[in-house]
């Protein structure tokens, strides 16, 4: 069997892309670690993307990194010990990725890492530690870009490395029409998934159901520890969002909502906070925005795929291809740079999406996974 270990929002999206390409679905099993557990961080992706219900749910909720990683590791080890040896597939760079890779490595199961070889070269990011360790214990390294292959080479990893292309490009392409069909703002404001945001994040524009869409809105997401753990930095970034001269739609990650609530941070009037959106709603919002502001890895790329200029609230990125021709600009926490970049003209050359493959990455990933199955 091929066991796919996932637990966080971006991993549900990646595994959906991969499983859609499986020619023999009976060979695949989905293990949900429980790292993300709210319905709008988990269930909604299963519905939107037609994922089968997980075969096993490990039920590890929130907590500190060590506790979460340790709990996944021990529950997964128990699960693997009960099973006939197969292949473990891990995705991206979360604690579920690291724990899945370690559990398999200790038991000698072959590990396939989807999204291997990415580096921000910033070891202060928990995700960077997860990526490096996972790559160094994996047997098959499925790289989304040529650069990722080269980065692995520099670390001495040359065996089992495949340049598959990026599975997130596959799924973005497959769903582009469905997403745009939602007519972003209409669906967004009337959508039954959008519960009213609790005080103090309520906003008059949402209550009245009115948003001046013809002005053009900015779409924002912020959830990185580097931006949410320091209340002063978070408050400053939010004040920066209020200086853009446009409405900002901001689906709040639970981590960010908690940081705002705990520290009494309220957004300016032009910033409309909502619950996390489903994949299709979010893609529709992205397609309709004039600018995207984010610290997410995946959203930087999706903006690039959709031809929406992006401003990234970080000083490094593991997706440097998006920086070409000014499609993505890194501003860290420099608010003047944020306002400048958000108001800059749209680049006049198309984004070089081919850097992320041809939209057939998932098929190549499946082919590699099958070669690692024992006879
Ligand atoms: C995790 C990943 C990050 C990824 C992000 C995707 C790690 C180290 N971090 O960050 O790489 O970019 O997911 O979104 O694995 N929470 C909820 N409900 C949920 C999920 C989380 O309330 O469904 C709360 C947790 O209790 C915690 C906070 O949000 O207080 C942060 O969650 P955590 O899983 O630690 O990290 P993320 O920021 O979600
Ligand atoms: N996303 C979503 N709803 C939202 C915000 C993001 O569906 O409200 C999707 C987005 O389209 C992308 C993925 O979540 O595919 C990125 O996840 P996130 O930013 O949480 O994690 P990262 O990519 O930074 O690891």
Image (tube, rainbow, N blue to C red):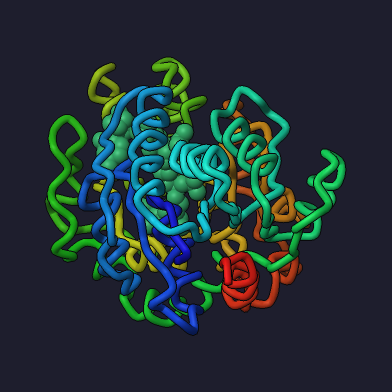
In the rendering, at what x and y percent does residue 160 appear?
75, 58
Decide: is 63 above or below 176.
above
Give left or right: position of 70 versus 108.
left
The image position of residue 188, as x and y in percent, is 26, 63
Quick check: 133 above or below 157?
above
Looking at the image, which residue is at 49% across and 84% down?
23
Residue at position x 29%, y 22% in the image = 265
- Near-viewer residue (130 or 29): 29
Front-most of 317 and 73?
73
Depth order, front residue of 51/79: 79
- As displayed, is residue 165 above or below residue 292? below
Left or right of 256 in this view: 15: right
Pick the residue in front: 99 or 253.
Answer: 99
User: In this image, 182 relative to 367: left or right?
Assistant: left
Q: Percent from the top left, x then y, of residue 267?
A: 31, 32
Residue located 25% across and 65% down the image: 53
The image position of residue 199, as x and y in percent, is 13, 33
Is residue 295 visible in the rendered structure shown here? no
């Amino acid at each position: 069997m091929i066991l796919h270990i996932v637990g966080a929002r971006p991993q549900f999206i990646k595994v959906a892309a991969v499983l859609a390409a499986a020619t023999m679905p009976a060979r695949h099993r989905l293990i949900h670690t429980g790292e993300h557990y709210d319905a709008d961080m988990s269930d909604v992706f299963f519905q939107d993307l037609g994922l089968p219900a997980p075969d096993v749910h490990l039920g590890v909720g929130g907590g500190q990194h060590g506790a979460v990683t340790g709990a996944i590791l021990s529950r997964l080890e128990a699960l693997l010990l009960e099973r006939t040896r197969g292949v473990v597939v891990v995705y991206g760079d979360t604690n579920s990725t690291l724990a899945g890779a370690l559990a398999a490595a200790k038991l000698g199961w072959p590990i396939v890492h989807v999204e291997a070889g990415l580096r921000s070269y910033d070891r202060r990011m928990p995700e960077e530690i997860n990526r490096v360790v996972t790559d160094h214990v994996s047997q098959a390294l499925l790289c989304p870009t040529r650069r990722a292959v080269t980065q692995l080479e520099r670390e001495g990893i040359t065996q089992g490395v495949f340049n598959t292309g990026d599975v997130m490009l596959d799924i973005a392409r497959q769903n582009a029409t469905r997403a745009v069909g939602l007519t972003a703002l209409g669906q967004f404001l009337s959508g039954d998934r959008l519960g009213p945001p609790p005080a103090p994040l309520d906003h008059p524009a949402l209550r009245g159901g009115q948003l001046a869409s013809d002005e053009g809105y900015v779409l924002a997401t912020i959830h990185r520890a580097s931006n949410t753990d320091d209340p002063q930095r978070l408050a400053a970034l939010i004040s920066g969002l209020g200086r853009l001269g446009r409405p900002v739609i901001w689906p709040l990650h639970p981590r960010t909502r908690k940081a705002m609530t705990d520290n009494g941070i309220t957004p300016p009037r032009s910033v409309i906070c909502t619950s996390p959106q489903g994949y299709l709603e979010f893609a529709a919002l992205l397609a309709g925005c004039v600018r995207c502001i984010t610290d997410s890895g995946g959203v930087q790329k999706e903006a690039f795929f959709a031809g929406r200029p992006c401003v990234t609230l970080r000083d490094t990125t593991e997706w440097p291809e998006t920086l070409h021709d000014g499609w993505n600009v890194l501003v860290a926490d420099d608010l003047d740079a944020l306002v400048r970049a958000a108001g800059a003209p749209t680049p006049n050359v198309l984004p070089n999406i081919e850097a992320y493959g041809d939209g057939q990455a998932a098929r190549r990933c499946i082919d590699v996974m099958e070669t690692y199955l024992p006879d």
